[in-house]
Structures are given as C-alpha cells and as structure tokens.
Image: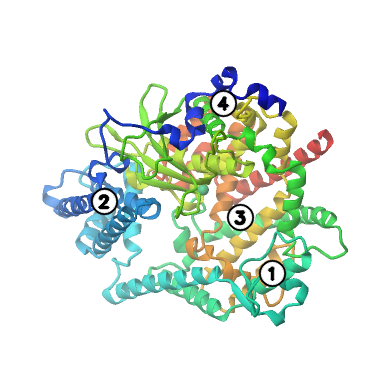
Amino acid sequence: MLTRLLHSGSKRAVSTWSPLATAFNAKPSSRFDFGFSRKETGLFEIPELENADGFQILEDGAISRTNLLVEEAINTGTRTRKMVEIFDDLSDTLCKVADMAEFIRVAHPDSKYAKAAEQACITISGIVEKLNTNRQLYDALSNVISKGDILETTETDVHVANLFLFDFEQCGIHLPEEQRRRVVELNDYILQCGQRFMAGAVEPRVVNIDDLPEKLVKHFTNNGEKVIVSGISTDANDALVREAGYKIFLYPDEKQEKLLQELLNSRHELAQICGFPTYAHRAIRGSTAEKPEVVHEFLNLMNNELRDRAANDLRELQRIKGSNQPMMPWDTAYVSSKVRKAWLGSSNEEFAPYFSLGACMEGLNLLTQALYGVRLEHQPSLPGEVWSSDVHKLAVIDEDEKLLGYIYCDFFDRKNKPNQDCHFTIRGGRQLSDGTYQNPIVVLMLSLPSAKRSVPSLLNPALVDNLFHEMGHALHSMLGRTKYQHVTGTRCSTDFAEVPSILMEYFASDPRVVSLFAKHYETGEKMPEKMLHRICASKNLFPSSEMQSQVFYSMLDQVYHNGRLEDSTTNILEKIQKEYYALPYIPNTAWQLRFSHLVGYGAKYYSYLISRAIASWIWQTYFEADPLSRTSGERYRHECLAHGGGKPPSKLVADFLNKEANPVNFTRSVINEIDAKAEKINDLKAAL
Ligand SMILES: [Zn+2]
C-alpha cells in the first residue's frame, strides 16, 4: 500500500512505459477520437465496407474476377502465366472475401454487418462448390502437373500446384461419375454426423434426483426432480462428487455411439474410394509425419519412454492426494491443479499487477526486436476501420522501415463475442506481379479482462501464455514471405501449424525473457525474483502424466481412423487405455463420446504432439542457451517462418534442424525436455 501511495501518478514511473505499452494500458474511452480532419474508411480499410451493403459489391467483384481467371486457366492458347499463378490468384480472389467475411460474421457486434457477411460466405462457398465440379479447370491443372507447364517452374511452384490438385481431388472430381456422386454424398453425410456428434458431446446429462445419494445432490444443478450434470466436476473438493460427476457425465450414450460409428465408417469408405488404404492415410498425407505408420511409431516410442516417468508423476500425485484410495481418472486434474496453486504460492492477484497488457505487449515487442529486428507499432485506427472501439491495430515493421503487415488485436470481452482464443487470416501475403508484396492482415482474438478506471487490463500467468501463443501464429503470418497466398504463414500442414505458437510459450516461460517486461503497472517495479521462479516452476509440474494423456488420445484417434470399425468405440477405448495410459478404464463410461476433437481433427489429433516436439527441438537447438539471440532469430525467421506452407514440412524441419525429421528425433527432444523439467523442479524445491 505504501508503494502505491508513493508512486501512483508519479512522473518517473509513468515515463518508463513505452508508447506501445501506454496504448495497450489505456482505457478504450480515453482513446476517443474526434476525427475532424481525418478521412473515414471501411472495415480493415476496405473502402467498400463503409457500410454493410459493401459486401454485395465485394461478392460481385469476386464473381466476375473468378470468371476471368477460369477462362485464363482453360484457354491453353492464350495463357501467358504459370498455371499455379492463376490458381493462386483465383484462391486469393475468393479467400480475400470469404476469410474476411467469416471473421466479420462471428465477431461484428452489429447484426447488419454479421448478416451481410454471412451472405457473402454463402455466395463464395457456392462458387467454390461449382469450381470443384469444373472438369475443364481440373484437367487444365492436372495436365500441367503431369506434363509440365508452358513456363519453367520452380520447386515451390510444383509443390503448391500439387496442393491445389489435392484439394480438388478431395471432392472426387477425378473419379468416374458414380463414384464422384458417392464422394459428394459421403462428404455431406460426414459433415452432418460430425455436427450432430459435436452437439451431443457437450449436452448435459439429466438423471432422476432419486438416483443420487442425497449428500451428492446439492453439488449439482437440480430442479427438485432431475439432476443436471454438465461436466466432469474436476474442481470439486470432495472425491465422491468428482467420481459421481465423472461417471454420470461420461455414461455411454447410444445415440452418440451410433453417430461416431457412422462418422468413422463413412470416412473410411470415402478414403477408399479416393484410393487410400485408410482415412488416416488421407488425412496425414503431405504433413510433417507424412504417413500414419510414422505417427504410430512416434506414439509408441513416446509411450515407452513415458511409462515409468508418468508412473513417477502419479506416485507424487498420490502422495499429495494422501488418502489410502488409489488415484483415479477423476483425481489427476484436481490434484495437479492443487499442487500448481501451492507452487504459485498465492492467488493470481499477486502476479497480475506485473502483467498489465501494456507490459506484455512491450515484452513481445522487445522479443521481436531482439530476435528479428522487427518492431510492433501501435497505430490509431481510422473511423470505420474496426468493428469495436476497443480493437487495437498493430503495424509490424522491419528494421529498414518496411511494413510487413497488420495485426488487429481484438482482445477484450464484449457481449456476444465468441469466447475463444483464435488467429484469423483476413488477407494472406503473396508476391504481386508488379514486384510488390501483398502484406498479410490478421486478427488475434482473445478474452482478456477490460481495463477499469485507473487499472489497465491485468493478465494472470495462463493468459500471458495465451497471448504469446496467439502472437506466435500472428508472427508466422507476418514473417511468412511466401510467393503464394495459398501457403501464407499459418496455411501449412496441421502438424507444423502449432510450432511457432508453442515456441512462443517457451519464451513466455523463460525467466530471462519474463524479467524483461514483467513490471508493476503502478510502480514500474520489476517482478521479484522468487515470484518469477514460482511461475516458471508451476509450468514444469507433472509433464509426463500430462504428455501421456495426449499420447493416449492421439493413439485412440489413430486407431479409430485405421479402417472399418470391428468393435464398439468403447471397447476400443478400453483396449487402448490399457496400453497407453497409467490409470484404468472405468466400466460403464465412454469418454470418447465427449471427445469432439475427433470431428475437427480426424486422424490429426497427434498434430499437437508433433508440433510440441518440433518446437521443443527448435528451442533446445537455437534458443535455450540465449533466448534473445539475433543469429538464431534470423535463421528461424528465414529458414522456418518465411516458408509458410510453401515447402514440404518434413524437409523444412530437417533442413532447419540439420537432422532427419523422424520419430526417434521427435521423441528425444520431448523426453530431454521432460527430464530437464524434473531437474529444474528439484533445484527450485531446494532454492525456495
Ligand atoms: Zn494455436
């Protein structure tokens, strides 16, 4: 309190904040702009979007441009550009409208804009659907790929052209008519099953009040007759409540089982029609892992390495749980979060004043300057440019003052805003024919607390991680300098896409980096050393048991997509759990029927683990010794980020790390890190 009285409002403390930090720490109302002499514009500075009707103009423009480009592609005689250039142009024309509209649809608070944007999404996907059945267009591309183009092509040209061809063939265009129809039918059916399964996965379970012992009833929502269980109650202090929540919420559901079986079997049929042995082969093609066999090998190696290590974690958890009861699946999350809190030493409120949003943004700026010589500059937005007055605009500027792109930061809670942390590409980067570069535009969406009166937005350690993670995606977009927008920044293989964002979490967890920016928002005081180490330690707890559950989920997802189902999905779960997870399967539960990622990831749930492994490998090789090394930063920027998805990911990883991107090397980096974490925890135990 004393420091607060002494320093609040003191000039010296205030002047230590950079303009960037000050902008992000200001209340939105204090950024009020009279805009007398300034021009007005539309959303994202797109002049047509000064009002919602502008979407129609953009749609019409996209349609006529599409027609011209299709003509150009199929008229062999008059063509003067490479086929892949025309396709990328086509893709840019449609994505520029569709991606932007998709974002406005979910994020714009004014329903007039949201509706117009939704209409634009529908129009564009209609065009795409039509293009996907345009056999002449397909033949034009396919001919160039099999026979070579009329102009000389580079490796990147060929790689990107093949990506376009693969996308095309997802719709079965290359198949005889009857099979093609079946593919369309299956795609549609899979979509429907998936949507229904996802809805069912979050549906609360309703049971009769009499079916529960009286002492448990009060822990759940009830209406006097029925008890409503809407999750697995991992936070409950009473083990019996956690057990009840787990068993009720995860009780098998026939409708969900049927949907999941239909989904998986239809996927298998689809894959076979398209010439793949299994759906997993189709999903993993072109990724860092390249084929399911590699994923299996990786998961099995991880499983072997993790078995004893995870058992150690469990013993430690068991010791803390303290009772004679063995650890059960409903205990792990509860006990480990208890330990994490104990390690942090106190509540989040103690840390938050050191993590004002302004301080964190300044931290990111210091990091990008140190690593890449790139700065983040806060720029006022023009009237009409943003969809909510609290959205901040960042220009990303290179050392030679060259603008690299814009990041719009939609960070704060507001009514009806989707509650998800997300990176949206609004416009992809690409080389233009006049020699200039079309700079990327992205939006980062987070759910941070808004600034209040004299207090800026304050983040807890988990939110700092989220901010750094999402900025990792944004920087991938900004520093990707691909020739084609089809492979701009984050448009790369799913099992590489999380590498840049996970890598940023390493920076956010390194005391050398955090100490650069964690400063008290009132006093400018640096975060005390002990507090710093507590945060970093809390992130190093029980890595093996956490990793083991990810390996288990990934393997389950692989096995489900490994052919036609021969058994119930629950029996398969039980079998896989026995082999890949330290805790036993609980009879009459069906966790997988709540696992909605099976829909979105479909045989690619392992992607997170491979991305983790690669990020860890990069961290250990290039940044662990010096997280601010410019030499390492430059190499990472030019050899990894710059390529986006324009280079086959396994080659990209192998070239950058100078070692083969194989399961042995992936596993080794993860296990190295886990063992180092255990050592760190022991050191900290001794030091604190
Ligand atoms: Zn991410």
Q: Dot 1 surroundings within 10 Å: few (below 14), some, or many (20 or more)?
A: many
Check the picture and name the quadrant holding the C terminus.
top right
Query: CA gap, disc 3 to disc 2?
Result: 50 Å
Identify which amino acid the numbered label 2 is placed on.
Ala
Q: Is residue 82 left or right of residue 366?
A: left
Would residue 676 be seen by someone viewing this image from the given angle? yes
Q: Secondary structure at mark 3?
A: helix
Mark 2 or mark 1, earlier in chain = 2
Give the x, y percent position of residue 476. 45, 40
Q: Which residue is mark 2?
A: 52
Query: CA gap, disc 3 to disc 4?
Result: 31 Å
Determine which quarter of the picture holds residue 282.
bottom left
Q: Secondary structure at mark 4?
A: loop
Identify which amino acid the numbered label 1 is placed on.
Gly
Q: Which residue is mark 1?
A: 245
- Closest to the observer: 649 or 50? 50
Determine which quarter of the picture holds residue 684.
top right
Query: CA gap, disc 3 to disc 1?
Result: 34 Å
Please name which of the two marks, 3 or 1, marks the residue nearer to the observer.
Answer: 1
**Mark 3 and mark 1 residues within 8 Å of each other at the beta carbon:** no
Query: CA gap, disc 1 to disc 4?
Result: 49 Å
Mark 1 or mark 4, earlier in chain = 1
Q: Give the numbered dot on residue 629.
A: 4
Q: Which residue is mark 3?
A: 298
Give the x, y percent position of residue 570. 62, 75
- Closest to the observer: 127 or 1? 1
Q: Secondary structure at mark 1?
A: helix
